Image (spheres, grey):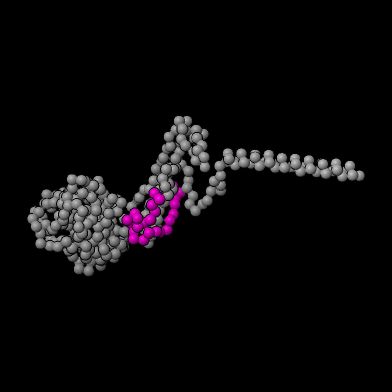
Amino acid sequence: VIDIKNALSEAITGKQTDVFVPNDLGLPDAAGIDFSYQTKIYSNSLEEYVTVPAEGQYLQITGAETIDDMVNAINGGTMANGASAVVNADGTAGTAANTFATYIKAYNINGTLVIRTLDSNFDVEYSGELLDNATPNSGTEIRRSSDFSGREGAGAEFLELKTRIDQTSSKDSLQLRLDKLNISENAFGDFSVDDTGLITMSQDGAMFAVGQIAIARFITNRGLEPAGNNLLSSTLASGEPIYNINNDKAAEVQANTLELSTADLSESLVNLMVFQRAFEANAKSITTADTILNTLIQLKR
């Protein structure tokens, strides 16, 4: 008979992810902040917990100014700001080594501290405790984000990223590469846009929101001022642009669809009239030439 803990682990496979948002950590902070971190690793094969770095000992992180400092400390690297060491619960020097890298790895993803298990199956899961003090006994636990933490198999890896593009932005400012966004080692996935304008990239069954097409509404569309090349600018008559969440009550976005025409209608109408007048003038010339020819033929007779 399998217990509930193991049953859930088998049902929802994938790496476990703990996410700590910057507001809860108080980072970035130029003055530096102290933390203590300990993890209990549970192995189904051993059917017991293993405390890292050791029972009653914590990783002490002092003077961390950025998320990158936290990442380097947990991964056993060199911190750009501050220092790390293993201490006892009372803050005195500990004897254990920093062995977090054996079980977990920390990342800075879009300014958030993300801690994941290295093992992709359900045999390894952990329960981390992050405290807001260099002395563990004096610290208060910092809760992980319930919105983004969990197992990848349960959709915990879905982090919404927003990319704002307007008429003053360059095409280089639209970032859709998953590796540049620190989401995945692979650059690209399957690209899609839904009817609300949400841009997503799918990779290995996981879906990531990488941008949102913003559609502006105006109080009076007739008050918009033409700026050429199908562009319009707001005026006092049109009012300021209005944006709604998920483009509610705005235009619907259709993916994999090309506009019937992107021509400037006013310019096209002017050109049509010019060409029509030119055609009429040419027609008059042909009629005149035909009349002259007939007259010459009659004179010859």
**Pick the front one: 22 or 275:** 275
Quadrant showing the C terminus: top right
Q: Residue 271: image x %, image y %?
A: 62, 41
- Asked whether residue 92 is in view, the answer is yes
Q: Is residue 262 above or below residue 93?
A: above
- Residue shown at 50%/38% (left/top)? 227
- Residue shown at 44%/48% (left/top)? 197
Q: Would residue 217 be found to the left or right of residue 122 on screen?
A: right
Q: Is residue 189 magenta?
A: yes
- Residue shown at 39%/49% (left/top)? 173
**Pick the front one: 271 or 13:** 271
| Circle count | 0
Residue farthest top in this picture: 236
- Residue shown at 37%/54% (left/top)? 208
Residue farthest bottom in this picture: 45
**Magenta residues?**
172-196
Q: Would residue 197 be found to the left or right of residue 183 on screen?
A: right
Q: Residue 129: image x %, image y %?
A: 19, 54
Residue 204, image quadrant:
bottom left
Residue 83, image quadrant:
bottom left
Q: Would residue 90 be found to the left or right of residue 109 on screen?
A: left
**Pick the front one: 55 or 8:** 55
- Asked whether residue 198 is in view, the answer is no
Task: Give the prevailing secondary structure in the magenta stretch.
Answer: loop
**Pick the front one: 2 or 47:** 47
Q: Residue 99: image x %, image y %?
A: 18, 63
Q: Is residue 254 magenta?
A: no
Quadrant showing the N terminus: bottom left
Q: Residue 64: image x %, image y %?
A: 19, 50
